[in-house]
Image: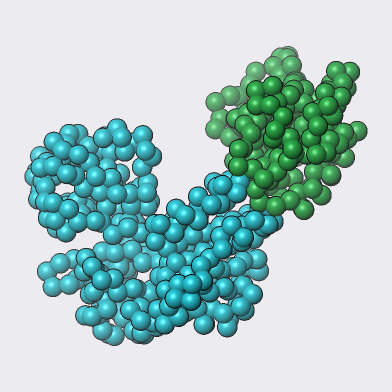
Chain colours: A green, B cyan
Amino acid sequence: MLVAGIKSRPVYGGLNIEAHAKRHLFVLEGEGALALVDQVKARGLEFLKQADILYVATGSVAHEHDKALAKLGADSCWVAPTIPVLLNRFNVMLGQAHMGTHIYLAGTEGFIGQAQQVAMNHGVDPASLHTEHRGSAARRVQCVHCKGITDSVTTSPYICTHCGLSLLVRDHYSRRIGAFQGVCIDAEEPGTAPQPEELFP
Amino acid sequence: MTINTEMKVRVAKVTQVAERVKRFRFERIDGQPMPVFSGGAHVIVSMRDGRALRRNPYSLMSSPTDTAGYEISVLRVENSRGGSAFLHEKLREGDELVLSQPVNLFPFDQRGKKHIMMAGGIGITPFIAMMDQMEFEGKAFELHYAVRTRTHGAYWKDLQQRYGSHRVKIYCDEEKLFIPVEKILENQPLGTHLYVCGPAGMINGVLGKARALGWPKQNLHSEEFLAPPPGKAFQVRLAKSNRTIDVAPHQSILEALEANGVDAPYLCRGGACGQCETGVVSCDGELEHNDHFLEPDDKASGKKIMICVSRIKGNEVTLDL
């Protein structure tokens, strides 16, 4: 069960390399590494002469995409142990970045949403980010009742990890907090929630 | 669909501020406060000049928080269609006029970390109100202002005095000084926005350089009000009301409709906002698109026209009105 057809649902346009960019900053998670690898296959290595890569493997650690990224020969390629550590470094790099730097985000939706928040705090218009969804369709969802965020939600409904309500996942998305919205599905008659469906594998 | 919230005003003060530039202060006749506006907003000034009714957009340049009156600055253009000539030569203190509510098609992006403004000539006016607001809100900004000569340039001394010469830079054609666009844009912090107001050539030149330096279009903003260019006379047929109206060589379609009592929608009257987009049923000649609003595809389709500034080369156009 999913409430779809909502305008705020993000659309990811792909990592289109901006030809006029003075610098490229790739911020990649998990299978998102392959989005950059595919760009290199299509366009060659030239653009990596002005590029920095930040990578966190998360669940893809066994695929060793970090090795493939390191081989590309970008100006820098830094691998973070966790998403928060990566976002911290991303934040510091943006504080020193100049106009003409283009930002590319690839990975799961939850990751893209969190990285986008960091960029927005530096005055970057989210429409100017280059984004590509790769890997799991799992969602980062906010419970609209207790405001608690649950990462990597694969079913709808799901049980809020903060307050325990059964939440219906909607396509309604908040860019400000980088999460979809979950709404109590059995408020009228508690305990009548339908079985969770695996919608976001 | 005219916006029926017009304000009757009196000309409170006329000031000659530079060669060919006059400032007009308007205050409401009913004594009510003016609405607060945001920097970059404009009003449509309706002028009764003999038999002709002229309506032109002008950027507001007074402080957005000054609700006692609005101020505009007007350049006397040589081949004036009547608006600037009327304001400069006929309008006196105490005269009455009608203003629209303020409309902002050129606001600054509140999310920006820094704001760079580039003005050419009378294009300075929206930035005067914007800087007032930015200063009040503590935003980082700088102005690069190109003037023909120091006597033609309005307000540059006042602005330098108020904001300091580190934030207000003047480039004078006569002294062979031009805005070094690339140099300015080269090392700006992430989250900087650029605003350009001036002649079309300047706007296109500056925005082209910014794009070449990798600035995303979301950070680039410009405003240019077009005067409807003259052409040959033609006829407009209105499909729904089955009327035929003549458009004179110096009249826009919108003006011709209004002169014949047709209440067509408009907002900026300068080809920028999109409010007056009108469907074209048929045209026996060629549409002359003069606006900044329609996308190239729309212009090529021949199905839409912005009646405030565009006209046709031909005898008759049938509009979906």
- Residue drawn at x 14%, y 56% as measured from the top left: B249
Q: Quadrant of residue B125?
A: bottom left
Which residue is most to the front? B176
- Residue drawn at x 36%, y 42% as measured from the top left: B294
Residue B240 seen in the current view: no
Q: Pick whichever, B280 or B65, lies toward us.
A: B280
Query: Quick check: B72 above or below B296?
Result: below
> Viewed as shown, does residue B292 lie left or right of B209?
left
**Quarter of the image where the C terminus of chain A is located:** top right
Query: Quick check: A179 above or below B202?
Result: above
Which residue is most to the right? A81
> Viewed as shown, does residue B234 lie left or right of A11?
left
Q: Pick whichever, B51 or A52, lies toward us.
A: A52
Q: Pick whichever, B177 or B156, lies toward us.
A: B177
* Residue B24 pos. (x, y %): 35, 79
* Residue A174 pos. (x, y %): 65, 39
**Quarter of the image where the N terminus of chain A is located:** top right
* Residue B213 pos. (x, y %): 60, 49
* Residue B118 pos. (x, y %): 51, 64
- Residue drawn at x 27%, y 52% as measured from the top left: B309
Query: Quick check: A138 above or below B238?
Result: above
Q: How many numbered dots are placed on residues in this image?
A: 0
Residue B53 seen in the current view: yes
- Residue drawn at x 72%, y 29% as measured from the top left: A45
> Viewed as shown, does residue B29 lie left or right of B197?
left
